[in-house]
Image: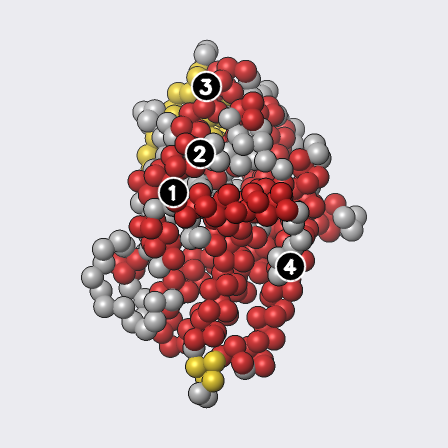
Amino acid sequence: MDLSFTPEQEAFRAEVREFLNDKLPKRLSGKVRQGKRLTKQDYEEWHAILNDRGWLGVTWPTEHGGPGWDVVQRHIFEEETTAAHAPRVVPFGLAMLGPVLMTFGSDEQKAHYLPRILNGEDWWCQGYSEPGAGSDLANVQTTAVRDGDHYVVNGQKTWTTLGQHANMIFCLVRTSKEGKKQEGISFLLIDMNTPGIEVRPIVLIDGEPEVNEVWFSDVRVPVANLVGEENKGWTYAKYLLTHERTNIAGVGFARAGLASLKRIAGEQQQDGRPLIENPFFAAKVAQVEIDLMAMATTNLRTLAAAAAGQAPGAESSMLKVKGTVIRQQINALARQAVGPYAQPFASESLDEGANAEPVGPDYALPATQAYFNNRKLSIYGGSNEVQRQIIAKAILEL
């Protein structure tokens, strides 16, 4: 299902594969392949390896420390790293905040924060969602009141992914209640070590405290940490979300998942024959592969337009919807293929060094873990229902 690539692009692919073979620690790729939990140190180790090679900020231009790759190189890199079971690069600083600072941040903010994102000094998390402001993001109620050279922040954020590891958070805060909801929002950078911040873990269905609540009680934030203009944060928030939603499409992750699905279906037996030979199951696999091929092409077109200076709009919503649906379909088929081995699930078995006796083949646990964890894909980054509304308004003019 590969697209056609030039000899130069295939040479780049070979370079990436050689790098992964030489530099990707087998311990890390093994944990990813087995569906084990990754620690903060695991993420930081891979982050540092990529940064040493200059391959960390894949979307960043060279003047800010990125490799300056074109969209095809980025596509190849994502495809090869996911196929090699490399840890994902935590996106909040690199893929979300970085582009916002490059476009809207002050010179001082760029000079201070961008190098720290690359060298791992700052681990960022995202302070967008609130209990009453999820898909209706403009309804944020966390307030930031100006007091001299500081804002005083009060409120709550929720579903803050990996917030327990972060030392910095970028937040949408309400600085005005005048006019439309979108007109009173600002974009603020906050040090997580500031007095008045409390992080409370939320344990998910797989037993992982991956997301958190973050509470702010009279937190004082320097005015210099405001990105852009006061009350213009909705513009910056939308810009960030287009990058996030395009990234959520996860073509590389879908391809890796499809390869794993085919392996499972080739080994699992039904009536004495490999499951992949069942025409009904094979038809489902073929359909999801066709959908993935079409999405990969659309993803490249969207990224190419973005590289040419066009901010993705409804296209990012289309990719978010289709990409998450495809990944969930692959996860569901893999869980179905594993059969009864998908039922026994002990959270502690996901920890490195767990001594629990494995139940079933080695792919049973990763298939079950991916199915549970990826139910979130169609919700975060703006639920798929909301994305369909955006598509209907922007493209169909409904």
Q: Badge 4 is on which residue?
A: 293
Q: In this view, does 109 lie to the left or right of 220?
A: right
What number is the disc on residue 337? none
Kind of residue at badge 3: His
Kind of residue at badge 4: Met
Q: Position of residue 368 (x, y in %)?
A: 40, 65
Q: Badge 1 is on which residue?
A: 23
Q: Where is residue 356 in the image (x, y as percent from the top left)?
A: 22, 64
Q: In the rendered structure, which disc, 1 or 3, sits on the residue that comes first in sequence?
A: 1
Image point (44%, 34%), residue name: 53
Look at the picture and state if 251 lies above or below 311. Answer: below
Q: Residue extending furthest left?
A: 355
Kind of residue at badge 1: Lys
Describe the element under mark 4 as helix, strand or loop. helix
What number is the disc on residue 112? 3
Label 1 and label 4: CA atoms lie apart by 29 Å
Image point (49%, 79%), residue name: 275
Label 2 and label 1: CA atoms lie apart by 10 Å
Q: Position of residue 16 (x, y in %)?
A: 49, 44
Image point (48%, 48%), residue name: 17
Q: Position of residue 176 (x, y in %)?
A: 57, 25
Please state which of the two labelled residues, at mark 4 or mark 2, is closer to the viewer.
Answer: 2
What number is the disc on residue 53? 2
In the foreground, 140 or 42:
42
Describe the element under mark 1 as helix, strand or loop. helix
Contact flag, marks 2 and 3 (Cβ < 8 Å): no
Q: How crowded is mark 4: few (under 14 residues within 10 Å), some or many (20 or more)?
A: some
Please state which of the two labelled residues, at mark 1 or mark 3, is closer to the viewer.
Answer: 1
In the foreground, 337 or 320:
337
Contact flag, marks 2 and 1 (Cβ < 8 Å): yes
Q: Is residue 126 visible?
A: no
Q: How crowded is mark 1: few (under 14 residues within 10 Å), some or many (20 or more)?
A: few
